[in-house]
Image (spheres, rainbow, N blue to C red):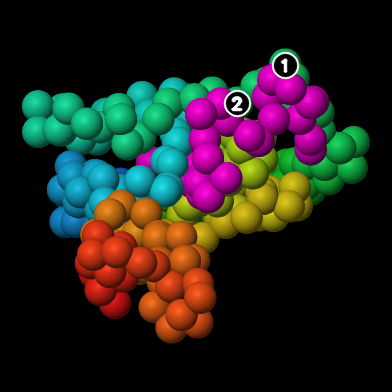
Amino acid sequence: MSSREGRGTGREKGASEGTERIVLDTSLFVNPDVRGVLGATPTEALENFLSLASRAPHLRFYMPPSVFEELMNFVQRDRLPPELLVHLRQKPPSRYEMTTPAVFLYELIEDIRGRVNKGLRIAEKAVRSMGVSGPDEAIQDLRRKYREALREGIIDSREDVDLILLAKELDALLVTADQGALKWADKLGVRWLFPEKFKDYLLASVEKAGPYGHPPPLSLRPGLPPSLSAQGPARVRWREAWR
C-alpha cells in the first residue's frame, strides 16, 4: 500500500525530521492481558500514558477517530486531563487517496473463504453432537469454536482497517494487541510493537529526550573531541545535564 505524493503522504505537516509517529489501538488500554503495564483500569492506563507522553515531545501519537470513540466507552471521561487531545491526535486515514496491492485483497478473500468453510464444518459437528451433549453444552461449544475459526487472526472491523491504513500512511509504529491487525499490518510492511513492551519503549524515549524534552545536538553531547564540544556556561550545563 502506498500513498500519493503530496497530500496523504507519511510526512505530516508541522512534523520535524526527528519525529517518530506511533498509532495506538484501544486494546493497549482495555485488554486486561496487556493493560497492566500502564495501569489497573483503562482510565488509569490512559492517564499514565499521557504522563509519559508529555515528557517525550519527539514522539507523536495518533489514533483513528473510530478507535478513539471506542476507547471513550471504557474510560471515565471526567478524570481525563485536558491535554488528552494534545498528546493523542485523532486522524482518519486518507481512504480515498491510498492504494492497496491486489495481492493483499486476494489473500484476504482466500483467508475469509477458508474460515467460512471451517465454520460450516464446526456447525455441522455441533448439530451431530446435540443428541450426546445436550443443546446448551453444544451451543456453548459451537460459539467458542466458531469465534476462534472466524475472528481470530483476521481484520474483522473498520477500526482494524483504520489502524493499519493510518500506520501505513504515516509510516508509523503500530501498537496493538489484536493479532489479526498485526498479521495483516505485517503483510503491508507496517512496523509494529508488542503492547507489553510499550511502557519500556516510552521510558526509553523519555530518557533519550533528556531534561530539555529532546536529545541535544551532536556538538553538545559528551565524549566528543574538543573541537566539536560545546563552549560557554549554558552549553556546559546542557552537556552535564545530558550525562
Q: Which residues are magenta?
A: 1-27
Q: Judge the density around disc 2: few (<14), some (14-19), many (≥20) Cα neighbours within 10 Å.
A: many
Q: As displayed, is residue 99 above or below residue 214? A: above
Is residue 57 toward the left or the right of residue 171 in the image?
left
Q: Judge the density around disc 1: few (<14), some (14-19), many (≥20) Cα neighbours within 10 Å.
A: few
> What label sits on residue 160 in the rendered view?
none
Residue position marked by numbered label 1 in the rendering: 96
Count how many numbered circles sit on residues in the image.
2
Coordinates of residue 146 in the picture (x, y in percent) = 57, 48
Coordinates of residue 178 in the picture (x, y in percent) = 51, 51
Residue position marked by numbered label 2 in the rendering: 93
Q: Identity of the amino acid at label 1?
A: Tyr
Q: Identity of the amino acid at label 2?
A: Pro
Secondary structure of the residue carrying numbered label 1: loop
Q: Residue at x 64, y 44 (%)?
A: 171
Coordinates of residue 163 in the picture (x, y in percent) = 55, 37
- Relative depth, front residue between 9 and 46: 9
Q: Residue at x 43, y 41 (%)?
A: 60
Q: As displayed, is residue 227 above or below residue 5? A: below
- Relative depth, front residue between 37 and 206: 206
Q: Residue at x 35, y 67 (%)?
A: 231
Q: Is residue 12 magenta?
A: yes
Coordinates of residue 167 in the picture (x, y in percent) = 60, 41
The image quarter in which residue 38 lies: bottom left
Is residue 221 toward the left or the right of residue 153 in the image?
left
Q: As displayed, is residue 241 above or below residue 18? A: below
Magenta residues, dominant SS class: loop
Secondary structure of the residue carrying numbered label 2: loop
Residue 136 appears anywhere in the view: no
In which quadrant of the rendered image does the N terminus lie? top right
